[in-house]
Image (cartoon, coloured by chain):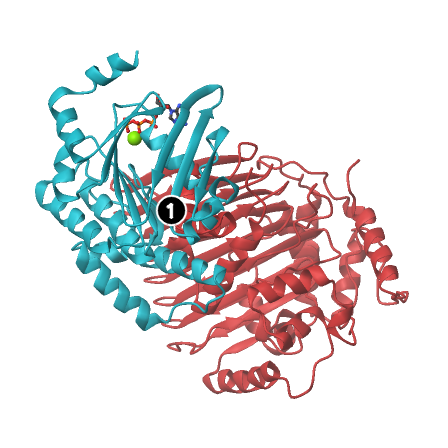
Amino acid sequence: MLKVKNLHASVGDKEILKGLNIEVKAGEVHAVMGPNGSGKSTLSAVLAGRDEYEVTAGEVDYLGKELLELNPEERSWEGVFLAFQYPVEIPGVSNINFLKTAINERRKYFEQDPIAAKDFLKMVKEKSALVELSDKLKNRSVNVGFSGGEKKRNEIFQMAMLEPKLSILDETDSGLDIDALRIVAHGVNTLKSKDNATIVITHYQRLLDYIIPDFVHVLYDGRIIKTGGKELALELEEKGYDWLTKEEA
Amino acid sequence: MAYSEDDLKQDLVDQEYEFGFTTDVDSEKIPKGLTEETVRIISSKKEEPEWLLEYRLNALRVFQGMTEPDWAHVTYEKPNLQDIVFYSAPKPKKELASLDEVDPEILKTMERLGISLEEQKKLTGVAVDFVMDSVSVATSFKEKLGELGVIFCSFSEAVKEHPELVKKYLGTVVPSTDNYYAALNSAVFSDGSFCYIPKGTKCPMELSTYFRINESGTGQFERTLLIADEGSYVSYLEGCTAPQRDENQLHAAVVELIALDDAEIKYSTVQNWYPGDKNGLGGVFNFVTKRGICQRNAKISWTQVETGSAITWKYPSCILKGDNSVGEFYSVAVTNNHQMADTGTKMLHIGKNTKSTIISKGISAGMSHNSYRGLVKIGKGADNARNFSQCDSLLMTDTCGAHTYPYIECENSSAHLEHEATTSKIGEDQKFYCMQRGIGEEKAISLIVNGYAKEVLNKLPMEFAVEAQKLLEISLEGSVG
Ligand SMILES: Nc1ncnc2c1ncn2[C@@H]1O[C@H](COP(=O)(O)OP(=O)(O)OP(=O)(O)O)[C@@H](O)[C@H]1O
Ligand SMILES: [Mg+2]
């Protein structure tokens, strides 16, 4: 589904991704871990097409398409979803209106008519139940006045509504209490299928107790320096990153 | 080189030539310039009574002793008044045979605003079928109003048909001495609207200048007088979202509202005069004095969406004279390219327990300047007066400017005043968030901007609000840098 080859990206003259490789197949869950500032959010932003980051080398193949050639909304329409580490507030725009616009813009791209109101409402009801998002949050302005945990839940609600093929969850577990963590993980697991894939960026192995990864990658200084199975996460939890980064140096 | 009224005229002439028109020499025009003679000619051409001529002449004398103000945060080449023709007989707009003859740009915009084909024809002056819907609507509309005793007509008609009302109220809220442009308007006003709602009557429909029958161009010095008698209610709509071009560069209108005891007036404006080209050339200068007076328990609510004009200078205000009266001002002002807007309100609290609310949302893009200027004045006798002001500015680029000048004068210590102001730049984060969800950049901007302006748009009557929303979208197109 996704093949990232030798990806280099920088902001200004600062290089952040320095030759990153990763391959994700349909049906898989990949965890990406790594110390603060190693480039995890940068990777997700580059995959989603944020133009602040300049890709200086490398290729990204997504379902047979050159991902880097597409603009952000096209990537979204083609099924790329990013759950933001810091979800953004949009005052005056209701969550529901926002999602409806998003869904209809995609439908336009696929030359479909706008979604019927009752289908949309049915979908909202079903998907919000999945992450136990309360009615009042659905009608409030996007993320405005949401608690940290509510914002993260709202990201997963949006993910459920948009039914992506490739989801990138950037520290969706940070700031969640245990119950919320379970709810979010349940949502992600329910949405999982053999046709879609998930990349979870996290600092904590506890999330991986709920969302079981097929692979765990360690991102350090702009590169994947180690890849292993689920047990690698446990090892990292226990030993930290030092033993790996020393090896690297 | 400054673009002058003459250049503009020349452009229009060239343009007409291009479209294959010939302009007849208009015998109904009077010589250029402003003198006592000009005023006398205007008044006599309009067959006005003596008292109105006196009113105009007084205003002219006041005007001649004034100088053009320059405190507003706008810069422009001052129009040369001796170069303006102050009267031309109202003539029907030139009829075109079909929409094919209309500027395609304007049609495109109208289409995007969702204006129906028939309406497009009407607005652009294309001959329409006699059975056209809105004509019959307008006729039954007028009948219905007549039954209720509501008077809604052109100002000139009112002078002839209801002189006692005009005489009683004209200039009582905006005296000729008020300011330079108001004095000018009082001397030479061309025409405008007049409206009277009888005691205890709730006007059942929105009164819109659009529906006024026999409408002919009201000219550049428009005069509006609206009286809501005791216990009445009216919602009045002015302007339209369709782009409007005018060969007159200078516009100086005066609007006076009178809300008698327990009356309520809701006055909504969408202003979309031609803003000039990308370099700011050729746009309309719009200097407007709008003010209302509230008697006991009365309420006046101004809502405006300002997207047009090269220069806008406008401060819809409320004099809260009666006890318990309420004044409101809700405004969205968009400036793009080289537009300049200096707009805001004055709330003058005189009565006890008077209350005012000000919500101003400025949006600036391009190289434009957008200023809010507001005065809240609490008089000595205004016990327990309350005001809430919120002035927000949204910047779309690094090259535009937003300025806020809130003035407060308080002579009564029981007053309760709250003021909030914010300035923010449209966020890359917000845009990217939308785009990641599949909402492209232009759409994202309109979503964010409409969200920002929502509090004000919500105050507009429904159909107007929908059009205004699209208008914001169009006005800001290509505005991001
Ligand atoms: N827009 C930017 N401008 C300047 N520096 C940036 C920018 N974005 C990221 N960086 C820098 O790039 C490095 C990687 O940042 P990134 O956010 O990708 O790290 P991360 O792995 O997600 O960290 P965390 O675990 O703290 O979320 C950091 O040093 C950061 O300061
Ligand atoms: Mg991060």
How far from the left and from the top, in percent, is residue B238?
A: 54, 64
Q: Which residue is mark 1?
A: A1
Q: Is residue A41 above or below residue B281?
A: above
Observer able to see residue B328: no
How far from the left and from the top, in percent, is residue B224?
A: 58, 63
Kind of residue at badge 1: Met
Q: Is residue B222 above or below residue B164?
A: above
Q: Colour of chain A?
A: cyan
How far from the left and from the top, in percent, is residue B472?
A: 52, 54
Front residue (pair B400, A198): A198
Q: Residue at x 75, y 56 (%)?
A: B247
Which part of the image, by quadrant, shows the N terminus of chain B? Answer: top right
Which part of the image, by quadrant, shows the C terminus of chain B? Answer: top right
Residue A231 position by quadrant:
top left
Q: Colour of chain B?
A: red
Relative to B228, B161 lies left or right: right
How far from the left and from the top, in percent, is residue B160?
A: 65, 76
Q: Residue at x 16, y 25 (%)?
A: A236
Residue B200 position by quadrant:
bottom left
Relative to A96, B251 lies left or right: right
In this view, which residue lies farthest toward the left? Answer: A178
